[in-house]
Image: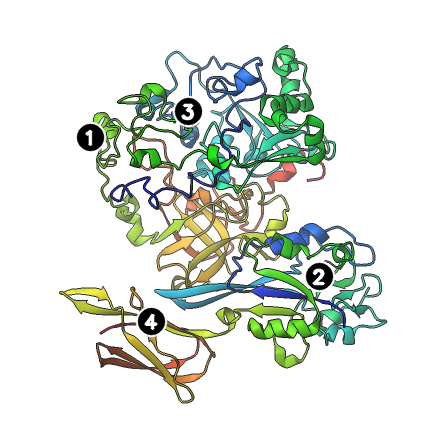
């Protein structure tokens, strides 16, 4: 694309503008742009929302952080290092931070929101073992569903679903984190999320849970500003550009607002067209920030040379000799092929793309309708098994037929799945989605086969390269065999389970939430 | 003559998103529509079910998805098998199993040759996709499955039968198991992607000491009955003869390049065949 002229008509990323021509100037705060008692430093609140909706900000005085992928190491081994994500500038990602930070105390409590780590992280038996370790003294889980890692918590604060509380939001509104995410839609739509029923059982909205905690800390007045959830929804409505188009009463009654497309004459120009024409940047983009321009303000790309670079000057300055990420992109044979076990024990490469029929763990498990989609889970003897796709010849070689229960395993863990032989995969590649909401170890958690479908137990915890923060989930090698009814991960005699089919039902040890 | 409901399923457009199946669950699971349907069980029923077909193998393969449901047959075996008029064929073409009259009539499940009737153990009644009759009667212009289909693979048409006959001819529509004489009102377009097979291939040639895609090769397919239209290989050297009958015996392919016959191949056609050859 660079060789043809990025931004030239017909040569561009995305379609039309940088997506559909929605009105990007209409303001509605995105999910990383702050809100109730907002975080000024780690959201984009200071840029827009804070001006429009002044409120008491929350400031975290603790500067310590842990890379999420190494949380188990930080807890159990006592240290971890990582590279931060930085929204302000490219160079921000080159810093390295350490846990524990100088002079800072170690983690004593994990307050976990939701229960999805085991199904969506990497090499996640580490998290299972972390939760059971004495080195993590106290765990709170604020969760809607009794699934995944929520079962390991010391205290569970049941949260209600979005149907049981008031809220307001915009479709694909991830701004503050991603830019112009709405341009993937045909229209920008802001929705009033009506509260349909009162929270079931003892569950509360997240906001009410936080207010209750703040009460006990003597700070609820500051946190809530005396507002109810609906009050905050109205404040967000007022802070946005919605009042210029629709009244609060009409908005509640209708339930949504479709942002009209911009007058064609006022529409922002096509992405990168200014670059191809050799002009100054004339489209509304957050990056680069004014201080990051190498030449004049609004001239050139967000690179050190301002030009499109084939040799990354930023990497040249940071680490020109990094064999894993050289300034000029080169092919690097992925490490798992050189793993001694690849040739002998684990000859299959596992790919785990995002779930097709759920958004992460959102629609999976929890007795959802999605379970009845055979390309998502298959019901065998009353249990809904996750689907593992494999090359038809690889399956035949192993005596595996469609919807046989198979064990897919590596040194890290083992998972039971329903096999789906197919011609759509080449030899030696197996495919199963990630994001199982259900973690159901047959024996001891962390040391036995999972029947829930968490293929993320098997993925690698390595970063793609050492000097970044990145997951390398595709670099996973496994073997697949017909399940013999055992509970062990891979024949390790330490883990002999005397009653292989005895399912340890962790649910029974913890009070369950009404109605779920 | 009155207007009657028909459903058209375009196999080429179905992307297996399951929105149709989910819309049915959303509408019927654990909900009673008085006079129309008893609650559908939360799990275990798929009143709209999607069949998957794979044809061929690397380097040429394709996958098709075929939504199936009650066909609302004009000559419905379930109507015949029902007792006490428990299954009604309406004037608008829709077939409805009466949730009260059909109690205990498990025989309806086996009566349907399409597997479109499901037994509800809790409610003790046979159930099916009823074209969302309760919504249609309430003024809906289309059933929910059509409403949620993102690609237009499902379309509902309410016209006189004489008009539908013209549409069937013009768009080459088929029904499932026509030999049974059930006369379905659910039609399929491009069904060949699922129930017919292909003979395809990828041709390469050696040029300048390298293996190159051989475009411009004229491929002819012949069997004892027909000479099929010639296909010229594309830029990738690929060709595909589609719409052939499964298990239809011996075929011969002839490959002509730059005015001479460069290869012939004999095949026995069971399932789809993929050839790779170098000329």
Foreground mark, 2 or 3?
A: 2
Disc 4 chain ID? B
Disc 2 chain ID? B
Quadrant of image for the N terminus of chain A: top left
Question: First in sequence: mark 2 or mark 4?
Answer: 2
Residue A135 in the image, given as x and y percentages of width and height:
47, 24
Secondary element type, mark 1: loop
Secondary element type, mark 2: loop
Furthest residue in direction bottom, as rendered: B224
Q: Nearer the viewer, residue A388 or B166?
A: B166
Secondary element type, mark 3: loop
Which residue is denoted by mark 3 in the rendering?
A: A66
Distance from Cα at disc 4 to Cα at disc 1: 47 Å
Furthest residue in direction left, as rendered: B208
Which residue is denoted by mark 1 in the rendering?
A: A320
Which residue appears at 66% of the width and 28% of the height?
A: A205
Secondary element type, mark 4: strand
Q: Is the residue under label 1 in contact with that under label 4 (CB below 8 Å)?
A: no
Q: Are marks 2 and 4 on the same chain?
A: yes
Q: Label 3: how many residues lie within 10 Å, few (<14), some (14-19) or many (20+)?
A: many
Residue B91 in view here: yes
Q: Label 1: how many residues lie within 10 Å, few (<14), some (14-19) or many (20+)?
A: some
Q: Is the residue under label 1 in contact with that under label 3 (CB below 8 Å)?
A: no
Horizontal side of A32 relative to B163 (left or right) equals left
Q: Quadrant of residue B220?
A: bottom left
Q: Quadrant of residue A67?
A: top left
Distance from Cα at disc 2 to Cα at disc 4: 42 Å
Residue B24 in the image, given as x and y percentages of width and height:
67, 55
Horizontal side of A157 relative to A339 (left or right) equals right
Q: Quadrant of residue A178?
A: top left
């Amino acid at each position: 694309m660079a060789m043809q002229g990025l931004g030239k008509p017909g040569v561009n990323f995305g379609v039309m503008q940088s997506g559909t021509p929605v009105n990007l100037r209409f303001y509605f705060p995105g999910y990383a742009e702050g809100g109730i008692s907002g975080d000024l430093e780690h959201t984009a609140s200071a840029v827009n929302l804070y001006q429009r909706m002044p409120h008491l900000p929350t400031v975290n005085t603790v500067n310590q952080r842990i890379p999420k992928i190494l949380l188990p190491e930080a807890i159990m081994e006592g240290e971890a290092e990582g590279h931060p994500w930085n929204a302000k500038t490219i160079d921000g990602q080159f810093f390295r931070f350490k846990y524990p930070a100088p002079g800072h105390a170690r983690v004593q409590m994990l307050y976990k929101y939701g229960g999805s780590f085991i199904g969506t992280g990497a090499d996640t038996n580490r998290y299972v073992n972390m939760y059971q370790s004495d080195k993590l003294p106290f765990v709170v889980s604020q969760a809607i569903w009794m699934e995944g890692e929520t079962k390991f918590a010391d205290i569970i604060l049941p949260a209600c679903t979005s149907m049981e509380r008031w809220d307001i939001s915009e479709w694909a509104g991830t701004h503050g984190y991603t830019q112009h995410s709405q341009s993937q839609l045909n229209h920008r739509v802001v929705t009033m999320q009506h509260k349909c029923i009162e929270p079931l059982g003892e569950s509360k909205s997240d906001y009410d849970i936080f207010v209750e905690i703040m009460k006990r800390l003597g700070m609820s007045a500051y946190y809530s500003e005396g507002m109810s959830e609906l009050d905050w929804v109205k404040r967000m409505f007022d802070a946005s550009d919605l009042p210029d188009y629709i009244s609060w009463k009409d908005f509640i009654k209708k339930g949504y607002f479709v942002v009209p497309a911009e007058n064609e004459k006022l529409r922002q120009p096509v992405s990168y067209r200014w670059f191809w024409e050799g002009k100054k940047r004339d489209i509304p983009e957050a990056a680069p920030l004014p201080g990051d321009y190498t030449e004049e303000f609004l001239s050139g790309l967000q690179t050190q040379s301002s030009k499109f670079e084939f040799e990354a000057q930023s990497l040249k300055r940071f680490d020109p000799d990094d064999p894993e990420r050289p300034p000029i992109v080169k092919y690097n044979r992925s490490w798992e092929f050189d793993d001694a076990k690849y040739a002998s024990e684990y000859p299959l490469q596992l790919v785990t793309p995002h779930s097709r029929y759920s958004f992460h763990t959102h629609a999976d498990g929890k007795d959802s309708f999605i379970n009845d989609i055979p390309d998502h889970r298959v019901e065998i003897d009353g249990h809904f098994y996750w689907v593992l796709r494999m090359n038809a010849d690889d399956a035949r070689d192993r005596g595996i037929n469609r919807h046989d229960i198979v064990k897919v395993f590596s040194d890290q863990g083992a998972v039971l799945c329903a096999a789906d032989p197919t011609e759509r995969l080449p030899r030696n590649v197996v495919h199963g989605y990630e994001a199982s909401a259900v973690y159901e170890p047959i024996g001891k958690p962390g040391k036995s086969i999972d029947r829930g479908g968490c293929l993320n137990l098997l993925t690698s915890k390595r970063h793609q390269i050492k000097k970044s923060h990145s997951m390398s989930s595709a670099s996973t090698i496994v073997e697949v065999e017909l399940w013999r009814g055992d509970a062990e991960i891979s024949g390790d005699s330490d883990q002999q389970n005397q009653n292989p089919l005895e399912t340890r039902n962790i649910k029974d040890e913890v009070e369950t939430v009404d109605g779920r | 003559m009155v207007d009657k409901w028909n459903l058209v399923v375009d196999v080429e457009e179905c992307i297996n998103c399951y929105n149709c199946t989910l819309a049915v669950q959303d509408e019927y699971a654990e909900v009673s529509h008085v006079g129309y349907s008893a609650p559908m069980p939360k799990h275990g029923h798929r009143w709209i079910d999607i069949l998957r077909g794979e044809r061929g193998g690397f380097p040429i393969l394709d996958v098709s998805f075929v939504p199936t449901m009650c066909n609302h047959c004009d000559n419905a075996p379930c109507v015949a098998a029902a007792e006490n008029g428990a299954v009604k064929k309406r004037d608008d073409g829709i077939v409805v199993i009466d949730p009260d009259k059909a109690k205990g009539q498990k025989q309806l499940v086996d009566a349907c040759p399409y597997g479109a009737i499901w037994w509800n153990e809790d409610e003790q009644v046979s159930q099916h996709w009823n074209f969302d009759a309760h919504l249609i009667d309430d003024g809906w212009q289309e059933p929910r499955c059509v409403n949620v289909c993102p690609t237009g693979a499902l379309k509902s048409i309410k016209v006189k039968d004489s008009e539908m006959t013209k549409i069937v001819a013009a768009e080459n529509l088929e029904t499932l198991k026509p030999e049974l004489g059930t006369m379905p009102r659910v039609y399929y377009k491009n069904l060949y992607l699922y129930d017919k097979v292909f003979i395809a291939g990828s041709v390469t040639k050696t040029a300048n000491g390298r293996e190159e895609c051989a475009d411009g090769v004229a491929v002819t397919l012949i069997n004892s009955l027909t000479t099929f239209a010639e296909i010229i290989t594309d830029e990738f050297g690929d060709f595909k003869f589609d719409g052939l009958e499964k298990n239809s015996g011996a075929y011969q392919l002839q490959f002509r390049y730059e005015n001479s016959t460069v290869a012939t191949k004999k095949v026995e056609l069971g399932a789809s065949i993929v050839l790779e050859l170098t000329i």
